[in-house]
Image (cartoon, rainbow, N blue to C red):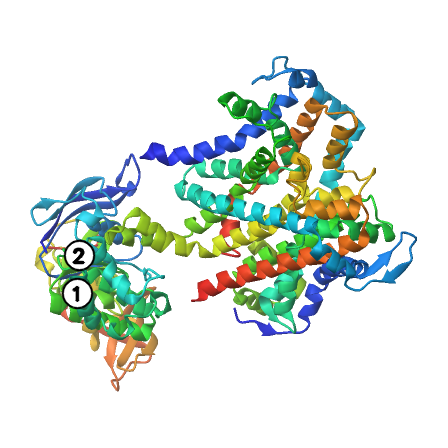
């Protein structure tokens, strides 16, 4: 589109800027403020420089949480993206059942996150939950409240259940937008199903997949409610992901300084990684 | 390469068609010789794309047969028919180079690499793509991409026919002519049967040896460009072909004589008229209409200068009758009289040429 | 071959519906039955959990509160995003690309980082425990999303439409409301859907910024499990009810889902 230069456009964006600035800049300033100061709880503050940052970056607890978080994020990405694409590939392009399918698939996305956690909490209970009972009756010794491995398994299963549909919906939209002529030409050229996927479908889905991966990466890195309600971060702290740890420090212990420093580091990590992801994928597209 | 025969072909997109209106293709019997250049010409919705897809195997007709040579291919899948198709917008494999695009159909069929290379280079040479073989296909312009599509169609040696579905739609106007000439040149060089679907008469008439004019799922006339121009079998053909199209003037027929209003007009097929009742129209091209001292009385409404000549739009009541006048010739300012070349004037009954 | 095509989506949907079925079936059991043993179907079918929710103000106010701030947030977010998206789509101005990017970065922010600062911020301006607080807080994430979606749709409408309208004598407000907005109605629908979705499901900030007056249903539910010790039947009923607004919204926009993802940003 041919855009005209018009500085008055700033009036149009003003409401948005005010809203977001209010909600982003002021808290940011607060956080920065706390991160470089120390208080003894009586409302007096002393400058402490980079002390809190050092403390966080040197704390085993922080690195452990970060490690768990990275493991979680990459695992669910590795499962949800291929799975979502695979499911989208099997869905028909049109027909009466398509909207019913899409609506049912989208349902998990609209359930309040605490309900998702609570649902799985009970669903996976060893004796009275459907999943728990099923697994135990097959022969697995399954108890996610006591065993770390089981807790991780349930956590990941819950997230896959919750968010794969987002990938499905995005991938499906990308697939549906491919004109029929491409498939017809492929037929004429004698291409196999795999070649059709590799040379037509996958390239045409690149944009949607980028969005899907980026969204899942960001949201899974920031996840809080569902794991908290499911496992509370346990057993012990084996499923304590990054934001769970942060909230514990900030709202639980009211350690303002360390919490603030950790917040900034947290935000920085995700900003950096998202930016890298995004640039890598965009560069891929321009090639 | 083979002769293509369409036998009693009919197609409806509905599961239970009840009446003619439910059919996209009403009834077709056509025979195309091997190696010819054919055009399917008609307005949008006339069924030409349906017909094309039936020939190429992307659609199975609800009735009738398609034969390649003696073989009934009606139900044969596309990749077994040895045909190629070029679509309305360029279909290229974006992630592959131009070379790999051209090689794709051959590699899929297991052709040895040495042969693939030879063939790809030959075709690239023919379609002026040699310099771009290493480039990524997605980086080419629209006409370049259509050449790749064309090349992919030509690269297989035993192709029965190549179909073109309005291939110049997205090409810039000044490049259309180049591409058209290239297609004609390739046809002459390779001798493959080519079937070209379009709604543009210029494309059809300049490309094809034989043009099939279609309307509402039926073949209206099939013939050489000259036949279509000089002896249109249907008023639709007369009107659709030619720029401007043929003049269609309602007339009355009685006792073997043709009258427009009070005026008697001499026509070429008067003897064929006999005694019949119908809706009669006079058909005569603007090229064969001229001003005269005496004749059909009309009013001059508008003069358009095309550069080569002038198109004069006259009015008989509400009816528009056009004629071509040379540059420099006199044009009456208001009232005028028209004369028609008898040999080129014919009467149509219900749209069809009275014969 | 047709059978196997339907197999995968069917299995997937079955997998998705299973926990939901479990939740709903539990909502019709008494807590004793749930804790007593395992049963696939409710043995003693009861609606007492639902009755409790519909008659106890603490419970049903939770729903009303949630719906209130979600609707408020959707209205604010979309209303603010519309002019901004228009500006991004039609004009170039100083700092426009950076502004757009900065907006998007807010979508990436971990809610946990904002929990404490928001608490302090909204308390200090006296908005603690109000619909407005949560509605405003959620705009941090929803406004960038709404701008992003709407800008995508608006860019699909050629500028010629604007110019024609001015030539026809429309003033800008007249053009914007009578001509432009109807043209991008699908985009507005998609934006409303996503704003509703993200605000409805978010818990951390909603809980942090409320206590009694504006307590969302999610907070009511978590409070129940901790104080009265696992009234599972009640929890299940409450949870089941929270699925309904989402289901309704998505049914209404079902035709726009594929279009919404496809247009705009794809």
| Label 1 neighbour load within 10 Å: few <14, some 14-19, many 20+ | some
Camera-side residue: C127 or A13?
A: C127
Report which quarter residue B261 is drawn in: bottom left
Would residue B221 appear left or right of C153 to someone viewing this image? left
- Give percent across and percent down for residue A240: 66, 42
Q: Mark 2, chain letter?
A: B
* Residue A181 appears in the rendering: yes
- Give percent across and percent down for residue A243: 68, 47
The circle drawn on residue B111 is 2
Q: Mark 1, chain letter?
A: B
Identify the element where label 1 is drawn: helix
Q: Quick check: C113 above or below B178?
A: above
- Give percent across and percent down for residue B286: 23, 71
Would residue A199 appear left or right of B212 to someone viewing this image? right
Residue at x 14%, y 55% (from the top left corner): B160
Give me the C-alpha separation between circle 1 and circle 2: 10 Å
Camera-side residue: C215 or A118?
A: A118
**Callout 1 touching callout 2 (CB < 8 Å):** yes
* Viewer-side label of 1, 2: 2
The circle drawn on residue B119 is 1
**Image quarter hosting the N terminus of chain B:** bottom left
Q: Earlier in the sequence, mark 1 or mark 2?
A: 2
Report which quarter residue B335 is drawn in: bottom left
How many numbered discs?
Answer: 2
| Label 2 neighbour load within 10 Å: few <14, some 14-19, many 20+ | few
Residue at x 24%, y 85% (from the top left corner): B329
């Amino acid at each position: 589109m041919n855009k005209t230069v018009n500085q008055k456009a700033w009036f149009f964006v003003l409401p948005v800027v005010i809203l977001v600035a209010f909600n982003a800049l002021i808290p940011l300033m607060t956080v920065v403020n706390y991160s470089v100061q120390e208080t003894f709880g009586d409302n007096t503050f002393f400058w402490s420089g980079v002390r809190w940052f050092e403390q966080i970056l040197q704390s085993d607890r922080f690195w452990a949480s970060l490690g768990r978080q990275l493991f979680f994020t990459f695992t669910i990405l590795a499962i949800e993206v291929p799975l979502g694409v695979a499911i989208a590939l099997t869905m028909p392009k049109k027909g009466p059942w398509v909207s019913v399918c899409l609506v049912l698939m989208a349902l998990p996305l609209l359930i309040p996150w605490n309900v998702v956690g609570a649902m799985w909490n009970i669903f996976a209970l060893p004796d009275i939950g459907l999943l728990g009972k099923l697994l135990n009756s097959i022969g697995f010794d399954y108890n996610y409240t006591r065993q770390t491995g089981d807790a991780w398994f349930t956590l990941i299963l819950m997230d896959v259940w919750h968010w794969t549909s987002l990938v499905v919906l995005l991938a499906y939209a990308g697939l549906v937008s491919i004109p029929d002529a491409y498939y017809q030409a492929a037929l004429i050229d004698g291409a196999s199903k795999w070649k059709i996927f590799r040379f037509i479908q996958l390239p045409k889905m690149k944009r949607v997949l980028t969005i899907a991966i980026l969204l899942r990466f960001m949201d899974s890195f920031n996840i809080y409610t569902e794991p908290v309600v499911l496992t509370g971060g346990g057993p012990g702290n084996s499923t304590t992901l990054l934001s769970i740890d942060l909230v514990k420090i900030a709202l639980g212990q009211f350690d303002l300084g360390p919490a603030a420093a950790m917040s900034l580091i947290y935000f920085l990590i995700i900003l950096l990684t998202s930016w890298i992801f995004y640039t890598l994928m965009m560069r891929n597209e321009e090639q | 390469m083979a002769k293509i025969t369409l036998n009693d072909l009919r197609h409806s997109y509905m599961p239970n068609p009840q009446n003619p209106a439910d059919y996209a293709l009403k009834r077709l019997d056509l025979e195309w010789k091997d190696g010819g250049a054919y055009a399917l010409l008609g307005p949008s919705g006339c069924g030409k794309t349906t017909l094309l897809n039936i020939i190429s195997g992307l659609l199975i007709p609800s009735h009738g047969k398609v034969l390649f040579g003696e073989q009934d291919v009606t139900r044969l899948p596309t990749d077994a028919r040895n045909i190629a198709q070029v679509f309305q917008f360029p279909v290229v494999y974006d992630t592959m180079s131009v070379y790999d695009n051209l090689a794709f159909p051959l590699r899929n069929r297991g052709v040895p690499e040495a042969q693939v290379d030879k063939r790809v280079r030959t075709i690239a040479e023919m379609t002026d793509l040699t310099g771009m073989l290493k480039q990524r296909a997605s980086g080419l312009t629209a006409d370049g991409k259509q050449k790749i599509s064309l090349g992919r169609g030509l690269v297989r040696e035993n192709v029965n026919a190549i179909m073109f579905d309005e291939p110049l739609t997205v090409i810039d106007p000044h490049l259309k002519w180049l591409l058209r000439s290239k297609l004609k040149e390739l046809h002459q060089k390779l001798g493959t049967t080519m079937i070209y679907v379009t709604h543009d008469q210029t494309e059809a008439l300049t490309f094809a040896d034989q043009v099939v004019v279609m309307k509402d799922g039926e073949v209206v006339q099939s013939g050489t460009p000259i036949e279509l121009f000089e002896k249109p079998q249907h008023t639709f053909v007369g009107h659709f072909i030619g720029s401007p199209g043929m003049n269609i003037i309602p007339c009355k027929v009685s006792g073997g004589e043709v009258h427009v209003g009070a005026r008697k007009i001499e026509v070429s097929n008067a003897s064929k008229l006999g005694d019949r009742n119908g809706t009669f129209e006079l058909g005569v091209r603007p090229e064969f209409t001229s001003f005269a001292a005496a004749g059909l009385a009309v009013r001059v409404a508008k003069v358009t200068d095309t550069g080569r000549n002038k198109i004069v739009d006259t009015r008989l009541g509400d009816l528009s009758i056009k004629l071509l006048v040379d540059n420099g010739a006199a044009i009456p300012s208001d009232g005028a009289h028209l004369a028609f070349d008898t040999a080129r004037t014919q009467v149509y009954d219900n749209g069809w040429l009275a014969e | 071959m047709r059978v196997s095509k339907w197999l995968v989506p069917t299995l997937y949907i079955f997998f998705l519906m299973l926990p939901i079925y479990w939740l709903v079936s539990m909502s019709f059991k008494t807590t004793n039955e749930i804790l007593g043993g395992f049963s696939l179907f409710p043995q003693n079918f009861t609606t007492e959990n639902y009755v409790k929710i519909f008659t106890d103000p603490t419970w049903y106010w939770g729903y009303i509160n949630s719906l209130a701030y979600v609707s408020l947030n959707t209205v604010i977010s979309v209303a603010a995003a519309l002019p901004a998206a228009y500006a991004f789509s039609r004009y170039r101005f100083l700092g426009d690309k950076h502004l757009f990017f900065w907006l998007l970065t807010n979508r990436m922010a971990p809610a946990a980082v904002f929990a404490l600062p928001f608490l302090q911020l909204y308390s200090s301006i006296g908005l603690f425990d109000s619909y407005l607080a949560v509605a405003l807080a959620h705009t941090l994430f929803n406004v960038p999303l709404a701008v992003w979606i709407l800008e995508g749709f608006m860019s699909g409408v050629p500028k010629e439409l604007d110019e024609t309208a001015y030539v026809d004598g429309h003033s800008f407000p007249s053009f914007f409301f009578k001509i432009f907005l109807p043209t991008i109605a699908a985009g507005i629908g998609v934006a409303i859907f996503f704003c509703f979705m993200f605000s409805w499901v978010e818990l951390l900030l909603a809980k942090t910024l409320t206590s009694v007056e504006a307590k969302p249903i999610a907070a009511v539910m978590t409070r129940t499990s901790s104080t009265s010790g696992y009234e599972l039947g009640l929890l299940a009923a409450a949870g089941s009810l929270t699925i309904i607004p989402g289901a309704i919204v998505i049914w209404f926009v079902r035709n726009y889902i594929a279009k919404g993802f496809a247009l705009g940003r794809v």
